[in-house]
Image: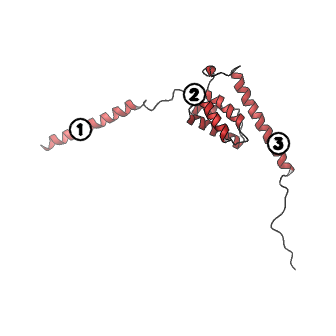
């Protein structure tokens, strides 16, 4: 009889190395959350909705709450609803709050630090965004010039044919 080699081998579900890796990740995540909370806490001695104008961005406060509410990289639906209600109370639109949640979850999923979260949130929290009407004058001027040139061309053609 020939000897056969099995295709499947039994391995323990959790190797000791996996436990160390998970513990290291858990420690890094805990340190990241503590650093973010410390930074947010240093901005204000007590957090009140009337003090939000003094803080650089309410989006940072929301980011801290989101990071504290995550289970790894997952945000349970009931916590998400609570965060969306909180975002409305501090003046952050629901769409912007969803973007902040996505940014924080993505960074947690990739294992990135939350120490430099200000950069990615600047895009979302940009104050003084134009409403799109800033270029309306140029568009109107261009359209007017185009119509004027078109009418002048038609007038010249009509005059030269007669």
Q: Residue at x 37, y 34 (%)?
A: 139
What is the distance, in whole Å, between disc 3 and disc 2 at their CAs? 38 Å
Query: Can you tell which quarter of the image residue 107 is in?
Result: top right
Please indicate, yes or no, whether residue 124 appears anywhere in the rendered image: yes
Q: Which mark is residue 151?
A: 1
Quadrant (top left, top right, bottom left, bottom right) of the C terminus = top left
Nearest to N terminus: mark 3 or mark 2: 3
Residue 56 sits above or below residue 153 on the image: above
Query: Can you tell which quarter of the image residue 4 is in?
Result: bottom right
Q: Which mark is residue 91?
A: 2
Q: Secondary structure at mark 3?
A: helix
Which residue, given by chain and number where applicable, does mark 3 sit on?
Answer: 23
Q: Which mark is residue 138?
A: none
Nearest to N terminus: mark 1 or mark 3: 3
Quadrant (top left, top right, bottom left, bottom right) of the N terminus = bottom right
Residue 6, image x, y percentages: 83, 69
Residue 40, image x, y percentages: 70, 26
Q: Secondary structure at mark 2?
A: loop
């Amino acid at each position: 009889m020939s000897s056969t080699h099995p295709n499947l081998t039994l391995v323990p579900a959790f190797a000791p190395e996996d436990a160390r890796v998970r513990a290291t990740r858990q420690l890094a995540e805990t340190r990241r959350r503590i650093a973010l909370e410390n930074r947010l806490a240093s901005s204000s001695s007590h957090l009140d909705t009337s003090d939000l104008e003094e803080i650089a961005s309410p989006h940072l406060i929301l980011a801290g709450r989101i990071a504290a509410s995550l289970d790894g990289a997952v945000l349970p639906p009931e916590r998400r609803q609570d965060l969306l209600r909180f975002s409305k109370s501090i003046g952050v639109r629901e769409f912007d709050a969803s973007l902040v949640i996505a940014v924080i979850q993505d960074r947690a999923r990739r294992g990135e630090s939350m120490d430099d979260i200000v950069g990615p949130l600047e895009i979302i929290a940009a104050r003084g965004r134009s409403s799109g009407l800033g270029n309306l004058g140029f568009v109107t001027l261009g359209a007017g010039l185009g119509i004027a040139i078109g009418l002048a061309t038609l007038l010249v053609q009509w005059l030269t044919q007669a």
